């Protein structure tokens, strides 16, 4: 799917230099390296986006973070040519950048909340939508409250559809470590969210 | 009592671990623990459902192109970002090499004070470029004021600029004397002193013989040996140090 997108853009197998205004400066990367980097963008930009989305839960912000992660990857690409290593590096960088952005947003939101008036009460007709948003927010908060090591495992497990081996490769960790962390994370989530089930049942 | 024993195990089982021995039997008889396990599993199922969207989330189709554009625009690759360092480094290296060559050529080929007199000390000629550089804009006036001298130091210094520089071979085969002194003289007295030093050097006069040879001048102070007493080091009194 993503490869098709890239091919549709017509740059999957072409050099970037000379195709964009000011692109001549990109020649500084070896052409072979440049081609490899293009391939990494093709097969890993969605991964970076999803990792960022798992933390930020906001599409535009997640795309900004993915772009930023690739900008950094381009600088360090000389030492990141191996595909697995590149993806592991990208995941960590996107996760870290997303966390930083999330923390900044939360600080800003707290300031805005302190200055804002009390929110209006939702009308009855949109109660279901509000409940849905509430559920999303609570699950997000529960994931946010996990320690970082458990949090990234949780996000990647969701992205990789609970394929422990894939998560282990992305994090460059033994599978046993990933399994253990994933279990701790899920146990913690279950305990944090159990009250939500009780609330839903009462309604 | 049994419910408390299995409280922790329920969360483990809900998270995917196999049930420990005895839990299945307990669940068969305890409705409360069955309900708790059900609630925990439902909570996790809600979380999984919320997060399942991540596996299928797609960025906008333009993301890859946007990344490409950002990389090309920012071009943060080290080779470009620090590319200016290479010509700058090369220029600095060339400058240093040139400076070393100039300084090497201007090193005096023989021992003795750094004073050169036309005709009398032809071997001192290579120093001219360095001294010309030292003189800067005042070179013309210095030359016109002292036509017999190849150079007059701008700051009225006579001798090497660096007393602590190690002795090194001169390209022409001479050797610099590390102990060659740098003498500071009052402004305007440089020419007089240089003539004096040149005279001493040309005639190989020791200061004492120079004094004995005459040429009395009211400007010349009588030379006399200075008696420097040996340095005596006295250890501090510990009582004084401690202030008691």
Image: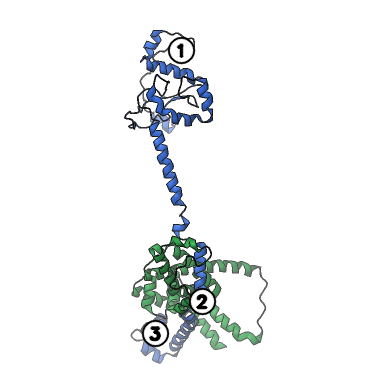
Chain colours: A green, B blue
> Up-down: is A69 above or below B189?
below
Q: Name the chain under label 2.
A: B
Residue that badge 2 annotates: B59
How far across and down, in percent of the image, does residue A139 sit? 51, 78
Q: Given this view, does label 3 or label 1 mark the residue nearer the observer?
A: 1
Report whether residue B34 is seen: yes
Cα distance in 3D space between marks 2 and 1: 93 Å
Give the mark, 3 or 1, whose residue is nearer the N terminus. 3
Give the mark, 2 or 1, whose residue is nearer the N terminus. 2
**Most foreground residue, B80 or A22:** A22
Do marks 3 and 1 share a chain? yes
Q: Name the chain under label 1.
A: B
| Disc 3 secondary structure class | helix
> Up-down: is B101 above or below B87?
above
**Most foreground residue, B21 or B45:** B45
Residue that badge 1 annotates: B221
Quarter of the image that includes the C terminus of chain A:
bottom right
Give the mark, 2 or 3, whose residue is nearer the N terminus. 3
| Disc 2 secondary structure class | loop
Report whether residue A96 is seen: no
Dividing the picture into quarters, in which one does residue B97 lie? Answer: top left
Total count of labels = 3
How far across and down, in percent of the image, does residue A94 sit? 47, 69
């Amino acid at each position: 799917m993503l490869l098709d997108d890239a091919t549709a853009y017509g740059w999957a197998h072409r050099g970037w230099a000379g195709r964009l205004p000011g692109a001549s400066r990109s020649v500084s990367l070896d052409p072979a390296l440049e081609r490899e980097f293009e391939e990494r963008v093709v097969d890993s930009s969605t991964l970076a986006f999803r990792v960022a989305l798992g933390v930020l839960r906001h599409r535009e912000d997640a795309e900004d973070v993915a772009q930023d992660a690739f900008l950094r990857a381009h600088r360090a690409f000389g030492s990141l040519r191996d595909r697995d290593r590149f993806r592991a590096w990208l995941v960590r960088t996107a996760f870290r950048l997303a966390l930083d952005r999330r923390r900044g947003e939360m600080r800003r939101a707290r300031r805005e909340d302190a200055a804002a008036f009390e929110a209006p009460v939702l009308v009855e007709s949109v109660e279901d939508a509000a409940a849905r948003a509430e559920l999303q927010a609570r699950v997000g908060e529960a994931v946010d409250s996990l320690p970082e090591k458990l949090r990234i495992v949780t996000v990647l497990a969701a992205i990789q559809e609970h394929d422990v081996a894939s998560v282990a490769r992305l994090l460059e960790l033994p599978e046993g470590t990933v399994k253990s962390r994933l279990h701790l994370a899920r146990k913690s989530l279950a305990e944090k969210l159990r009250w939500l089930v009780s609330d839903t049942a009462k309604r | 009592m049994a419910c408390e024993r299995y409280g922790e195990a329920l969360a483990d089982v809900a998270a995917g671990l196999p049930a420990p021995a005895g839990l299945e039997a307990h669940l068969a008889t305890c409705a409360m623990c069955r309900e708790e396990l059900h609630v925990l599993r439902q909570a996790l199922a809600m979380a999984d459902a919320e997060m399942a969207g991540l596996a299928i989330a797609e960025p906008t189709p333009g993301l890859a192109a946007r990344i490409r554009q950002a990389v090309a625009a920012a071009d943060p690759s080290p080779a470009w970002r620090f590319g200016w360092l290479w010509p700058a480094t090369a220029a600095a290296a060339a400058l240093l090499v040139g400076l070393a060559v100039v300084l090497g050529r201007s090193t005096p080929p023989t021992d003795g004070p750094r004073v050169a007199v036309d005709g009398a000390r032809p071997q001192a000629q290579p120093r001219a470029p360095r001294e010309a550089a030292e003189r800067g804009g005042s070179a013309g006036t210095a030359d016109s004021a002292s036509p017999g001298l190849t150079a007059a130091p701008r700051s009225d210094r006579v001798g090497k600029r660096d007393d602590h520089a190690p002795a090194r071979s001169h390209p022409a085969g001479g050797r610099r004397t590390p102990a060659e002194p740098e003498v500071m003289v009052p402004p305007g007295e440089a020419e007089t002193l240089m003539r004096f030093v040149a005279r001493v050097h040309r005639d190989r006069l020791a200061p004492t013989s120079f004094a004995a040879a005459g040429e009395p001048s009211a400007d010349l102070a009588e030379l006399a040996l200075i008696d420097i007493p040996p340095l005596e080091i006295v250890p501090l009194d510990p009582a004084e140090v401690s202030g008691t």
